[in-house]
Image: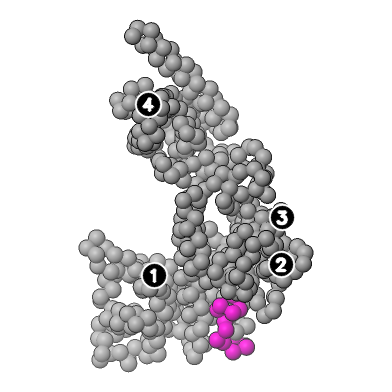
Amino acid sequence: MNRFDLINKPSSMSGNKPFKKNYENDADFIHNILNEMDEIVYVCDPLSYELVYLNDFGKKTFDVSSYAGKKCFEVLHKQSEPCPFCKNEHLTINDFIVWELPVENDHHYLIRDKLISWDNRLLKMGIANDIIHQELTSQNVRKKLQNEQILLKCVNVLARKEKFSDAADIILGHLGEHYEADRAYIYEYHLDEDGKLRASNTHEWCSRGAVPLKEAFQNILVDHFSLWKSQFEFNSNIIIESVETIKDEHPNDYAILKQLNIESITIVPLRLDDKTSGFIGVDNPKANLNDYSLLHSLAFVVMNEQKKRAMERRLRKLSFTDKLTGLGNRNNYMQTLEQLEKIPPPNLGVVFIDLNGLKMVNDQLGHDAGDKYIKNLADVFRKHFREEDIYRIGGDEFVFLTQRIQEPIFREKIETLKKEAHKLYPDSISVGSVWRENNIRPAQMIRKADFLMYENKKEYYLRRDAKQDVS
């Protein structure tokens, strides 16, 4: 699929034709989030190079107060023409392009670019992270270069890995090897059902011969670690060069560490929203003992990445969720369909549903009643099919794309759904469905289900007209 033909019809990147808007009524929220980021975030037109948005951090970095009417290469790179290293021709809506900007004025940027829907236009969003100045400014030249290489590897891993867990395992490996530690780990805090704060070892790397502790340290009460809790309340690190030094003052912590053959430990807290959210640390480090800047930098990188990914999840949800029903929207549907066309499942059930009488409800009872009509029926749909398989693709149209379901179960679900919908609102839906195993052609199946839905719709009109004739 051409990236500029997102819904099977031309879309103008320059803004002359409207592109589907995903962030309506959420612009303030998005701008606030972007302005809180300690990275440069910019949005520009990849055809005209018009700079449409620059967050507060970017304005401060480039010392600009206004960029209206200016080009991205003028503001961001002080150039008079488009940059030769520009990656616009490689942009997609699905994935970030990750690349390094050549060093400019002692700045070394890692760039993440992709196409997004912004204010009715298809534009490029870029996120630039200045690795050198944000992470390594406090280190001497030799350590700075060494740590920069490790840090750059870790940032690259975070940028490229879809799952944070996959990235965390690699990052902890770099961390543990740098300090020649027995273990490197991340603990994350959470509240239990009673509101008590607990910690779980969510990610762990072990050197050869070291005993893994991850499974043993799940849902541990934070109160059990008196030293940890007291230090983290002041956002202080924990550096224990010898556990013998805490034997008298913190006997419980000492006993636990000795039992685990931990003789030394260094931990840096993770903080989100001014609260401790966990920690990252190493056990029994044997190298670089006087320089824990890499550990601090990785703690910052992990915190920033967690915050960024939370923002991306929020943006993605806004972009791929129908606001009225909470189901997938047309953008979500188109992306899923594209994926199914590329990699067909072993079997597929397709349901096409049209809501009967929605216009009449809107005209006679008002749009609030119409919205309630849609939401109530959507709730019926999600009771019988998985929410992530249901898409609202138009005002009164829904499509279900149900994978790996046997035909008898698929048909039974449809029948119970129809009965419940009819009980709630008689004759409220017209349904067409197709199930197929092997030789799956999703687009063809959707067209067939659409055709069957319209045949069912004709029957609805005949019943309605017959009732009107009788009355």
Kindly indicate whether the residue at mark 1 contacts the one at mark 4 (C-beta within 8 angstroms). no
Nearer to us: label 4 or label 3: 4
Mark identifier at residue 48: 3
N-terminal of the two: label 4 or label 1?
1
Say which residue label 4 marks: 364
Name which residue type carries label 2.
Glu
Residue 142 highlighted magenta (yes or no): yes
Q: Nearer the viewer, residue 91 or 144?
A: 91
Kindly indicate whether the residue at mark 3 contacts the one at mark 4 (C-beta within 8 angstroms). no
Determine the residue positioned at 77% across, 67% down. 80
Could you tell me residue 350's position as x and y percent?
Answer: 49, 31
Name which residue type carries label 4.
Gln
N-terminal of the two: label 2 or label 3?
3
Q: How far apart are marks 2 and 4 (CA)?
A: 55 Å
Please report the bounds of the magenta region as a residue range.
Answer: 129-143
Please indicate whether residue 370 sits to the left or right of residue 294 in the image.
left
Mark identifier at residue 273: 1
Could you tell me residue 9's position as x and y percent?
Answer: 65, 37
N-terminal of the two: label 2 or label 4?
2
Q: How far apart are marks 4 and 1 (CA)?
A: 48 Å
Say which residue label 2 marks: 74
For numbered disc 3, what is the local secondary structure? loop
